[in-house]
Amino acid sequence: QVQLVESGGGLVQAGGSLRLSCVASGFTFSSYTLGWFRQAPGKEREFVAGISGSGSKTATVDSVKGRFTISRDNAKNTVYLQMNSLRPEDTAVYYCAADPMAWVVRVKIEGYDYWGQGTQVTVSS
């Protein structure tokens, strides 16, 4: 049974930091690109960051460049999203997802087969 379980969300003041984690099970973790997406109320789900299966390729959306960093530990089947200098506009439910095209980082939702249940991040001003 495939599972992706996110944790680390919460309430933080603007300028603060959070580290999200996503633990995977039920599939060969290193054979998948892992991505973080987010969805704010009333908005579409959007790509935030992704990392290829080996960890050699990463991508981040322009709005979080220089503030968010994605990483993975294949020995622990875990992907992380370090979020610094948080802003109120970062408030959203954050989801991790797995894409079987492990050698590239795709930004479209349709490429991702498996999804976690999400973790809420709220940034107060």
Image: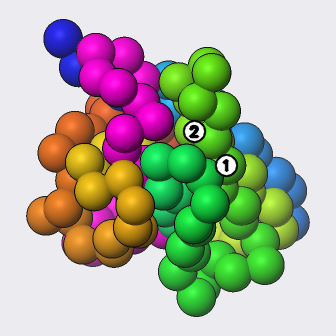
Residue 7 visible somewhere in the drawing: no
Q: Nearer the viewer, residue 89 or 48?
A: 48
In front here: 111 or 85?
111
Residue 106 vs residue 87, the one in the foreground? 106
Q: Position of residue 72 (x, y in %)?
A: 63, 41
Q: Quadrant of the C terminus?
A: bottom right
Q: Earlier in the sequence, mark 2 or mark 1?
A: 1
* Residue appearing at x 61%, y 19% in the figure: 76
x then y, percent, for residue 106: 33, 71
Residue topped by disc 1: 71
Residue 115 vs 125, above or below: the answer is above
Residue 61 location in percent, x, y?
A: 52, 80
In this view, 10 is above or below 77: below
Q: Residue 79: which disc? A: 2
Helix, strand or loop at mark 1: strand
Relative to the observer, which residue lies in front, 45 or 14? 45
In the rendered structure, does residue 31 fall within the stretch colored magenta?
yes
Amino acid bearing label 1: Ser
Q: Amino acid at mark 2?
A: Val
Question: In the image, which residues are magenta?
Answer: 24-48
In this image, 23 relative to 1: left or right? right
- Which residue is depicted at the point 48% across and 56% down? 52
Quadrant for residue 40, please give it: bottom left
* Residue at image location 83% in from the left, 68% down from the top: 85
SS for callout 2: strand
| Residue 45 in sight here | yes
Contact (Cβ within 8 Å) of mark 2 with mark 1: yes
User: What residue is shown at x 25% (from left), y 48% (from top)?
Assistant: 100
Residue found at the far bottom of this picture: 62
Q: What's the CA distance linking mark 2 and mark 1? A: 6 Å
